[in-house]
C-alpha cells in the first residue's frame, strides 16, 4: 500500500504508535514512492528499527527482518537446502531412483529472509538491520539483490520479485558502507528528538504515565545528551526508564530515585559514575523546573 | 517530471554541492527530481528533506548540504548550520603494552659488556644511530620482521578434512549414488585469508633517519602477496606499491623522496591523508584493511584537517596503527598538535625506532583485533 501524501503516511504511523518527525516521514514516503531502499543511520536507540516495524504496521504489510552479524552468509540470509529432508527422501524412495530435479525442488528449500521477501506475493517490509555489522562481501551481495530484486539458486533458477518489497536498512555507523550501496539508497539520519517530541513519544509508549513524570524524565535525558558521554541515551532508554519509574509509582523525579534507576538509562559504567558524582543533582533540578 | 525551472534549479544545485565536495551523481539528481514531483513544492520543509535524502548519503555531508541549501534556495548569506545533536564519540586510545623491550632498557653501547650478542645489540639500537655497515646488516633482519600479515576469517566455507561443519550439500549429492546412505562424510570450515594492509610512510626531512628502515619493513610486507598497498608522503602523497613490488627498496625510497618532497615545505600529513582518502579510500582500498601510518606527527598545517581525515580513515579501516619513532624515547609525550589530533583515531600507537620495535609491530599486525570488537 502506498500513501497519497507525506501527511497520510505520518497519520498512519501515528496510528501505529510511532511518532515520526517530518524528515523521517518524508524519507519513508519517498522510499515507497521512488521504490528505493531507505538507509537509516543514527545513534543507537533513536528508533531506526522501530521505524521499519511501524512502517510495516502502518501499511498492513508483513515485516521480514534480517539481522546482520559478522560472518552472515547466504545460507542464513537467502536460502539453504533442507538436507535432512533430502536424505530422508532418498531413503524413503529406496526402490526407485531419485532424480536430482526432484531432490532440489521447492519443497526442500528453506527460505531465509531475503528469499522470503523476494518471493512474497503479499506486501512486505524487509528490514535489514545493522548492515554495518555484516562483512564487505555480504554487502556486495546485497547490492546485487537490491538492484535487481532477484535471486539465483543454481538448482532452481532465477527468482524475480513479483512485487518489490519496501526495504529499510539500518546502520550504527561502526564502519562506513560501500558508496555503491549508499548510491542505491535514500539516506536519512535520525537525530535525537526535540524535548516536545520526546515527551509525546514517552506518553504514547508508556500508557498511563503521569504527565509530569514523562516531561521530567524526557527533560532529564535531554540534559544527559548535552554531557560528553561515551554512549548518550536514546529514546529507547527514555521509554524504558520512564516505564521503570512509572512501575515504581513515581509521580516525579527526585535525586534519590534517579540514582537508583539511572542504570537503565546509562549503560556504561563510566558514564553512570561521572553523572552520579557530578551532574545528577543539577540535572534533576533542571528537569523538575522544566514543568 | 517537474517543470523546467525546477529541473534547472536542481541540476545547478547539484553542481553547487559537488563544489562543496559532496559526490552527486546523475542518478541522485534524477531521484531528487522524481522525489520533488511527489511532494508539495510549496512546503519548504518537504523540499529540504527530499533533496537531502536523495542527494546526500553520509553524515559528514549534512552540514555542507545545509549551508548550500540555505545559500541556494533561500538566498541567505552562508551561515553556520545548527549544531548537530550527535556527540562525537570518544574512542579510548589503546596503548601499546608488552613487546617493546626497548622502552625499558634504553640501548647504549655500554651494554655489550654484559655479553649481549651483536644481533641483540642491533635490535635495540636506534635506527638513527646506525652506521651504514650496521644498517646493511640490519636490512636482513628488518626483512624478516616485515614478513608478517594479518589474517581475517573468510566468509566462505571451503572443503576441509578436519572441518567442523558437515558439507551437507556435497553429502546429499554423494548420497544420491548410494541410495541415501552417507557413505562418506565431507566437512567444510571457514578458512583464514590475508587481510588487506595499507602502509603510509612519512619520508619528510624530520623522518629521514627512520624512513629508510621503515621502508625496508614496508618492502617486506609488500612481499607477502596481494592486498598490500604502500604509499609515501611528505608534502604530497605518492603510491609506492609498484616500485616496492619489483625494485630495490633503496631506489624506491630515493624516487619517492624526489616526487613527494618540497624540501622547504615540511610535512603536510592532513593534506596527504586527505589525498589518500579522496583518491584511494573512496575506491574502498582502506575498507577492512589494517592501516599503518609511520610518521613523527609533525604537522606543518592546521591539525584540525589531520583530525578529520584520521576520522574518515578510521571509519573505513579495520584498524589503524600509528608508528612513531619518537615514541622510542621514554620521555616522549605526544604533545605536537598533529599527533594529538590523530591519536583519538589510532587503535595502536607504537614506536618504530629500532629492530625490536619493528618485531613488536609485526606481532601487533599479525594479531590485530577489530576496534569495535566489544
Image (tube, coloured by chain):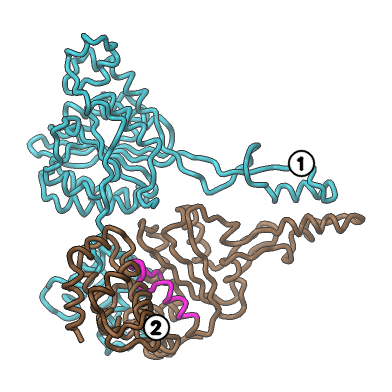
Disc 1 is placed on an element classified as loop
The answer to which image quadrant residue A8 occupies is: bottom left
Q: Residues in magenta?
A: A39-56
Q: At 66% across and 57% down in the image, what residue appears?
A: A154
Give residue A221's position: percent from left, percent from top. Answer: 26, 74
Q: Is residue A44 magenta?
A: yes
**Foreground pick, B283 / B8:** B283
Q: Which mark is residue A205?
A: 2
Give the brown chain's letter: A
Q: At 20% across and 63% down in the image, what residue appears?
A: A277
Q: Which mark is residue B184?
A: 1
- Give the answer, above or below, for where A26 lies relative to B268: below
- Give the answer, above or below, for where B195 lies relative to B128: below
Please determine if labels 2 and 1 lie on a single subunit: no
Q: Which mark is residue A185?
A: none
**Foreground pick, A246 / B210:** A246
Letter of the chain that mark 1 sits on in the rendering: B
Circle 2 residues within 10 Å: few <14, some 14–19, many ≥20: some
Disc 2 is placed on an element classified as helix
2 or 1: mark nearer the eye: 2
Q: Is residue A91 magenta?
A: no
- If the image is split into quadrants, where does the N terminus of chain B sit? bottom left
Q: Cα distance, mark 2 to mark 1?
A: 57 Å
Give the cyan chain's letter: B
Give residue A260's position: percent from left, percent from top. Answer: 30, 70
Give residue B121's position: percent from left, percent from top. Answer: 25, 15
**Foreground pick, B192 / A144:** B192
Inspect this view and state whether residue B19 appears: no
Amino acid at each position: 500500500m502506498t500513501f497519497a501524501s507525506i501527511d497520510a503516511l505520518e497519520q498512519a504511523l501515528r496510528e501505529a504508535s510511532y511518532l515520526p518527525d517530518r524528515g523521517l516521514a518524508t524519507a519513508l514516503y519517498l522510499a515507497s514512492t521512488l521504490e528505493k531502499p531507505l538507509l537509516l543511520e543514527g545513534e543507537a536507540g533513536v528508533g531506526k528499527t522501530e521505524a521499519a516495524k511501524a512502517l510495516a504496521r502502518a501499511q498492513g504489510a508483513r515485516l521480514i527482518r534480517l539481522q546482520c552479524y559478522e560472518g552472515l552468509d547466504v545460507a542464513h540470509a537467502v536460502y539453504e537446502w533442507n538436507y535432512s529432508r533430502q536424505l530422508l527422501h532418498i531413503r524413503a524412495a529406496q526402490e526407485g531412483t531419485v532424480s536430482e530435479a526432484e531432490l532440489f525442488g521447492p519443497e526442500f528449500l528453506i527460505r531465509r529472509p531475503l528469499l522470503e521477501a523476494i518471493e512474497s506475493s503479499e506486501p512486505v517490509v524487509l528490514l535489514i538491520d545493522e548492515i554495518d555489522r555484516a562483512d564487505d562481501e555480504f554487502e556486495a551481495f546485497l547490492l546485487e539483490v537490491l538492484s535487481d530484486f532477484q535471486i539465483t539458486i543454481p538448482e532452481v533458477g532465477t527468482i524475480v520479485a513479483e512485487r518489490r518489497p519496501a526495504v529499510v536498512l539500518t546502520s550504527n555507523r561502526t564502519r562506513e558502507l560501500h558508496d555503491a550501496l549508499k548510491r542505491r539508497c535514500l539516506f536519512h539520519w535520525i537525530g535525537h528528538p526535540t524535548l516536545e517530541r520526546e515527551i509525546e513519544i514517552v506518553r504514547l509508549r508508556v500508557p498511563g504515565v503521569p504527565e509530569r513524570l514523562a516531561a521530567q524524565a524526557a527533560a532529564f535525558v535531554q540534559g544527559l545528551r548535552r554531557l560528553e558521554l561515551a554512549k548518550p541515551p536514546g529514546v529507547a532508554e527514555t521509554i524504558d526508564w520512564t516505564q521503570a519509574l512509572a512501575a515504581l509509582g513515581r509521580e516525579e523525579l527526585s535525586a534519590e530515585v534517579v540514582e537508583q534507576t539511572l542504570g537503565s538509562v546509562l549503560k556504561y559504567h563510566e558514564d553512570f559514575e561521572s553523572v552520579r558524582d557530578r551532574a545528577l543533582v543539577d540535572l534533576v533540578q533542571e528537569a523538575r523546573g522544566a514543568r | 517530471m517537474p517543470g523546467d525551472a525546477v529541473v534547472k534549479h536542481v541540476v545547478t544545485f547539484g553542481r553547487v554541492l559537488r563544489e562543496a565536495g559532496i559526490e552527486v551523481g546523475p542518478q541522485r539528481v534524477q531521484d531528487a527530481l522524481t522525489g520533488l514531483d511527489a511532494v508539495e513544492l510549496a512546503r519548504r520543509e518537504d523540499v529540504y528533506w527530499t533533496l537531502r535524502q536523495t542527494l546526500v548519503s553520509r553524515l559528514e555531508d549534512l552540514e555542507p548540504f545545509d549551508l548550500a541549501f540555505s545559500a541556494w534556495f533561500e538566498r541567505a548569506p552562508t551561515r553556520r548550520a545548527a549544531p548537530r545533536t550527535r556527540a562525537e564519540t570518544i574512542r579510548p586510545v589503546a596503548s601499546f603494552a608488552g613487546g617493546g623491550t626497548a622502552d625499558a632498557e634504553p640501548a647504549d653501547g655500554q651494554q655489550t659488556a654484559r655479553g649481549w650478542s651483536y644481533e641483540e645489540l642491533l635490535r635495540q639500537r636506534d635506527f638513527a644511530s646506525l652506521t651504514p655497515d650496521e644498517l646493511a646488516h640490519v636490512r636482513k633482519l628488518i626483512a624478516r620482521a616485515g614478513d608478517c600479515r594479518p589474517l581475517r576469517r573468510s566468509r566462505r566455507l571451503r572443503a576441509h578434512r578436519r572441518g567442523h561443519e558437515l558439507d551437507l550439500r556435497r553429502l546429499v549429492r554423494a548420497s544420491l549414488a548410494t541410495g541415501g546412505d552417507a557413505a562418506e562424510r565431507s566437512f567444510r570450515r571457514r578458512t583464514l585469508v590475508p587481510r588487506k594492509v595499507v602502509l603510509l610512510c612519512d619520508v619528510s626531512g624530520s623522518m629521514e633517519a627512520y624512513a629508510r628502515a621503515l621502508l625496508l619493513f614496508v618492502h617486506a610486507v609488500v612481499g607477502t602477496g596481494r592486498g598490500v598497498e604502500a604509499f609515501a608522503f611528505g608534502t604530497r602523497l605518492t603510491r609506492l606499491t609498484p616500485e616496492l613490488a619489483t625494485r630495490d627498496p633503496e631506489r624506491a625510497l630515493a624516487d619517492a623522496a624526489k616526487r613527494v618532497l618540497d624540501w622547504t615545505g615540511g610535512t603536510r600529513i592532513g593534506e596527504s591523508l586527505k589525498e589518500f582518502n579522496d583518491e584511494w579510500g573512496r575506491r574502498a582500498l582502506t575498507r577492512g584493511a589494517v592501516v599503518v601510518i609511520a610518521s613523527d606527527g609533525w604537522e606543518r598545517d592546521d591539525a584540525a584537517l589531520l583530525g578529520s581525515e584520521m576520522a574518515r580513515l578510521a571509519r573505513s579501516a579495520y584498524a589503524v596503527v600509528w608508528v612513531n619513532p619518537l615514541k622510542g624515547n621514554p620521555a616522549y609525550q605526544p604533545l605536537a598538535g598533529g599527533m594529538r589530533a590523530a591519536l583519538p583515531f589510532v587503535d595502536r600507537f607504537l614506536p618504530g625506532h629500532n629492530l625490536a620495535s619493528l618485531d613488536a609491530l609485526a606481532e601487533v599486525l599479525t594479531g590485530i583485533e577489530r576496534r569495535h570488537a566489544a
